[in-house]
Every structure is written in structure tokens, then in C-alpha cells.
């Protein structure tokens, strides 16, 4: 009965797509309002990301949304939007969820060289795919997080840029058993850039992040955490880099440096010492427009992240990510997307006598987009992910999972 319901709902929505006309586009001077909707059917080979006894399922995903944009003179803009994922599983309907994703972004710039940039992104869900730190993968976890960024800068002498940055990251969980991961980060930064060519800047940046695990400090997490044993820490990051203008054939940013992690407390609830750490770090993303219809993207990231395993003998891990993505136009209507990513999680400063904990995650994806007309697009994609443990003691965290999807997107 459920399968028949999903098929009927999908047929109904596809019919709406085909019957719809692009009459909803709205324009008010320099303000554009764009309604959109995506509908896709997806097959999951391992819905709970289990190491054994993988369970598969299909789901229907409907994502309506709207984008609002204003573009003024150079550096002056306002963008806002909202979308919601409505996901309905066929067999495991208890895992149905919604994901809400509003955002706003604005920029102000004066002819004197002063500018302001501000962004805010909110994310609320109950999905099974885990947090940015990979907490809760394979479990339906109700949570939300908000990221607010502000940058104030001054461009002068047609060559130099001085900028101050601030970010607040707030993460909250609904269940008491998950609240030990509640976190409030305040990040402060300053950078200085010098233009060395018409499309190239070199720069240096310093950032300090103060991370506060609120529920651990308040003993709400119910895991013996207190303000004397919480995972609170401070990061000091030192970067140098090169920034290539968006008008260049190769554009993006290369940023590498050194990161230091200092803990506020001496021991965790199990009496294991919090040891300060340091390592190389990176935040790099480059786009190479090889040909008119060929775009190659490289990304490399490395940073410290807090442990996501309760009672783990290590309080953090080094997260290293490297990937390539290709967008290739095939004729005027078809776009091919290919991607590959390698990720290595290395847990550091573990308790003596335990084997080293490290995981390698490979992620491959391929897809095609067909532009039916100016407002309707058909899509098909496949993604494969595998996670392997460096020691057999941690085999329970391994998994193989794939997702196949087909869908339609209309942007009026």
C-alpha cells in the first residue's frame, strides 16, 4: 500500500511539473523572486549505515523553495532564501523527516573602500546523515545549528585590504542523550591582503576559535561532564594564502597554515588527560575552466574536530579531506557531473594501551542533468560511500552505502 501511495504521489507531482507554466517569476526593479521545486525518488542500499545486515529502502523527496535577490552597485547586494526537504520513506516511514534551510546574505560597500559582509544560515533536521563532525550517522537525530558570519574591511591604495571577521556557530540537540554535543563557537579573525597582479592577491590571516560545550559545563549531558571536565577548547590558526579573482580562468583560494588546539581543562570524565595539540591545516578550493563546457574543481581541507564517540579515549580528531569534481557539458542541454573524495579521520592523544583509532572514507558520485527548457531540468545521479577502520577493533563503525536518485527541478 505504501509503495502504491509513493508511486501515485510521484506521478501527481510530475504531472504538475509538466502542466505548469513559468508564470510565477516576479521582478520588482532590481529585486528578483524565484520560486522553485525539486522532486526526486531515491534508493538507499544501507539506510542506517550499518556494518552488517544493511537495510535498503526507497524514498520520495520533495523540496520547495524560494530565492530573493537584489543586486545594487559594486559590493552592494542582498540575497535571501528558504527551502525545506520533505522526505517520505517507503518501508521505514518512522524515519520520515523534514529539513529546513533558510538563509540571508548581504553586502554594503562605499566608494571610500569600506565594506561590510554578513551571512546567516540556519539548518534544522531529523535526518540520518549526521552532523558536519559526523555525529549521529545512521540514526534519526533531531538537531539544529546556525552559522552567522560578519566581515568588516577596508580597501586602500588600490592594492591593500585589511579585514576583521567574526563567526558564531551554535549547535543544539533535542534529546538529552545527544546534548553532550551541544556547542557554541565564537571565532575571531583578522587578515591582510596585497594585490600582486590584476587578478591575484596574497594574504595572511589569524583566527581564534573559542568553543564552549554548554551542556557539558552545565552537567546537563548526564555523562559525568562538569565545567572541570568538559571538552571546551581554543583554536589558534595561522594561515598564508593566494586568492585568484573570479574572472580568471583559474580562480579560488589556496590557504595553508598551522593550527594549535588548547583545552580549557586538564582531564575528561574518565580521567584521561586533555593534551594540547598542533598540526598543519588547510582550506583550499580551486576552479579551473579548462574549456567553455569543462569545469574542474579541487578542494583540500584539514582541521581539528571534536570527538563524536561518547566515552571515547580521544577528545578530538584530525579531519583531512581532498576531492576532485568535474562538470562537463555534453551538447547544449546535458551536463555531466563526476566527483571523487578521500577523507581521513585520525583520532589523536588516545589513552595508552588502546589501538589507534582512524577511519578512511571514500566518496564517489556521478550524475546527469538534462535541461528540458528554460525552467525545467531532469536529473539522475548515483553516489557510493565506504568507510573503513584502521584497526579491526573498530569494525562496527565501517559501512558501504549507495544512493541512486532520479528527479525533476523547476525554477520559475
Image (spheres, helix red, strand yellow):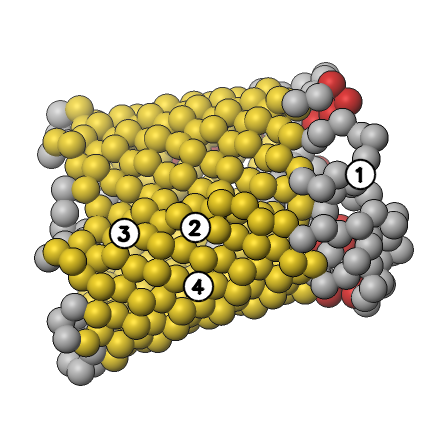
The first of marks 4 and 1 along the sequence is 4
Distance between mark 1 and mark 3 Cα atoms: 39 Å
Closer to us: 64 or 76: 76
Reading the image, the residue beneath label 1 is: 351
Reading the image, the residue beneath label 4 is: 206
Residue 74 appearing in the image: yes
Residue 58 appearing in the image: no
Provide residue 90's location: percent of width, then percent of height. 61, 28
Distance between mark 4 and mark 2 Cα atoms: 10 Å
**Secondary structure under the numbered disc 2 in the rendered image:** strand
Residue found 76% across the figure and 27% down from its top = 355
Reading the image, the residue beneath label 2 is: 257
**Secondary structure under the numbered disc 1 in the rendered image:** loop
Q: Are marks 4 and 3 in contact (CB under 8 Å)?
A: no
The first of marks 3 and 2 along the sequence is 3
Reading the image, the residue beneath label 3 is: 242
Distance between mark 3 and mark 2 Cα atoms: 12 Å
Distance between mark 4 and mark 1 Cα atoms: 32 Å
Within 10 Å of disc 2 (Cα), the crowding (few <14, some 14-19, many 20+) is some
Amino acid at each position: 500500500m505504501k509503495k502504491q501511495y509513493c508511486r501515485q504521489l510521484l506521478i501527481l507531482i510530475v504531472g504538475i511539473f509538466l502542466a505548469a507554466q513559468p508564470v510565477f517569476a516576479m521582478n520588482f526593479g532590481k529585486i528578483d523572486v524565484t520560486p522553485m521545486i525539486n522532486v526526486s525518488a531515491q534508493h538507499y542500499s544501507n539506510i542506517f549505515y550499518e556494518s552488517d545486515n544493511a537495510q535498503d529502502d526507497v524514498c520520495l523527496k520533495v523540496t520547495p523553495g524560494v530565492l530573493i535577490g537584489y543586486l545594487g552597485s559594486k559590493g552592494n547586494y542582498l540575497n535571501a532564501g528558504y527551502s525545506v526537504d520533505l522526505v517520505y520513506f517507503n518501508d521505514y516511514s518512522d524515519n520520515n523527516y523534514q529539513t529546513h534551510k533558510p538563509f540571508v546574505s548581504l553586502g554594503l560597500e562605499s566608494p571610500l573602500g569600506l565594506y561590510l559582509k554578513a551571512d546567516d544560515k540556519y539548518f534544522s533536521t531529523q535526518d540520518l546523515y549526521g552532523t558536519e563532525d559526523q555525529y549521529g550517522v545512521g540514526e534519526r537525530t533531531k538537531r539544529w545549528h546556525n552559522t552567522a558570519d560578519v566581515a568588516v574591511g577596508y580597501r586602500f591604495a588600490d592594492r591593500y585590504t585589511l579585514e576583521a571577521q567574526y563567526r558564531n556557530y551554535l549547535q543544539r540537540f533535542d534529546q538529552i542523550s545527544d546534548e553532550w554535543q551541544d556547542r557554541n563557537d565564537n571565532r575571531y579573525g583578522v587578515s591582510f591582503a596585497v594585490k600582486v597582479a590584476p587578478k591575484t592577491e596574497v594574504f595572511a590571516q589569524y583566527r581564534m576559535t573559542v568553543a564552549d560545550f554548554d551542556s557539558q559545563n552545565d552537567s546537563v549531558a548526564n555523562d559525568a561532564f562538569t565545567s572541570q571536565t568538559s571538552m571546551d577548547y581554543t583554536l589558534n590558526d595561522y594561515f598564508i594564502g593566494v586568492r585568484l579573482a573570479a574572472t580568471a580562468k583559474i580562480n579560488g583560494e589556496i590557504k595553508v597554515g598551522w593550527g594549535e588546539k588548547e583545552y580549557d581543562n586538564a582531564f575528561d570524565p574518565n580521567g584521561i588527560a586533555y593534551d594540547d595539540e598542533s598540526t598543519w591545516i588547510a582550506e583550499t578550493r580551486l576552479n579551473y575552466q579548462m574549456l567553455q563546457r569543462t569545469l574542474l574543481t579541487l578542494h583540500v581541507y584539514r582541521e581539528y574536530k571534536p570527538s563524536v564517540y561518547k566515552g571515547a579515549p580521544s577528545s578530538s580528531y584530525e579531519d583531512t579531506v581532498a576531492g576532485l569534481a568535474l562538470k562537463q557539458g555534453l551538447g547544449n542541454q546535458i551536463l555531466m557531473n563526476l566527483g571523487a573524495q578521500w577523507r581521513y579521520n585520525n583520532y589523536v592523544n588516545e589513552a595508552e594501551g588502546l589501538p589507534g583509532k582512524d577511519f578512511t572514507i571514500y566518496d564517489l558520485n556521478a550524475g546527469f542533468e538534462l535541461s528540458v527548457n528554460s525552467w525545467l531540468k531532469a536529473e539522475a545521479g548515483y553516489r557510493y560511500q565506504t568507510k573503513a577502520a584502521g584497526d579491526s577493533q573498530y569494525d562496527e563503525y565501517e559501512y558501504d552505502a549507495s544512493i541512486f536518485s532520479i528527479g525533476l527541478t523547476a525554477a520559475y
